[in-house]
Image (cartoon, rainbow, N blue to C red):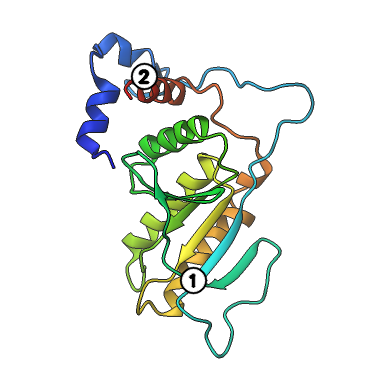
Amino acid sequence: MTDFTTWNARVLRESGQEDLDRLEASVPGSHARYPLLGEERGGLGEPPQLQWTTRVVLERFPEQGFEPPDLWLEVVAGKPLRGEHLESFLRVVRVDGEAFVTVDLHLLRNVAEIRRLRETHPDIECWVLVTEESVEADPEKLVGETIRLLTGVLSGCRRLEIRQQPGEPLSSVRARLNVVRLMNFESGLGALCDPLPGAGLFEELQRRLSHSK
């Protein structure tokens, strides 16, 4: 695993301010700037929509059951993740044709890295974003859960996996699951095509990561 300092040096090495400025565009009438998106890429026909499913991994099944089944939701009793660790500053474990990714709160950096990994490992059929932190009675942790799950959606992970931690109450797991429900039914993300192809910022981050190996 590569730490954040090493990653930062790889991405920003030999970067002058002029190189960085070209990844941003100014906001008319203000001093603010925002990441440059560029033109969307796509073939003929309707662009693919963002699609993901959700799996809840419990320590063990509760006697009263957990949730009414949804088409997009799967509930299983879990086991620790064991497999091949891929080279990355993120924690990435490959188990057969799936790759399980655990991220921190650096959304842009993490999205760029997962997209790079997807390009360099085309044989992996399914990328899974895993969250593993209890949010019981802690609103700040719930915000962190939202950022992590959003990272998975924007980076193209096909499954979001909420793993119950030892001793974590079911009320905390339900709170985490509600974040995914909001993304499914309130955010409208599932009705959009991938918003990031052609984005200058992400393309440049991926390029620098790929050329730094």
| Residue at screen point 65% across, 46% down | 51
Gap between marks 1 and 2, in whole Å? Answer: 37 Å
Q: Which mark is residue 211?
A: 2
- Viewer-nearest residue: 127 or 155: 127
**How many C-alpha atoms fall within 10 Å of the one at disc 1: few (<14), some, or many (≥20)?**
some
Question: Which one is in front, 178 or 110?
Answer: 110
Residue 19 point in image, percent of width and height: 31, 11
**Which residue lies most toward the bottom here?**
63
Q: Is residue 155 left or right of residue 73?
A: left
At label 2, the amino acid type is His
Q: Along the horizontal axis of the image, is 136 left or right of 198?
A: left
Q: Amino acid at mark 1?
A: Gly
Which element is circle 1 on? loop
Residue that numbered label 1 is attached to: 78
- As helix, strand or loop, the secondary structure at mark 2 comes to helix
- Give the residue displayed 54% in from the left and 59% down from the top: 180
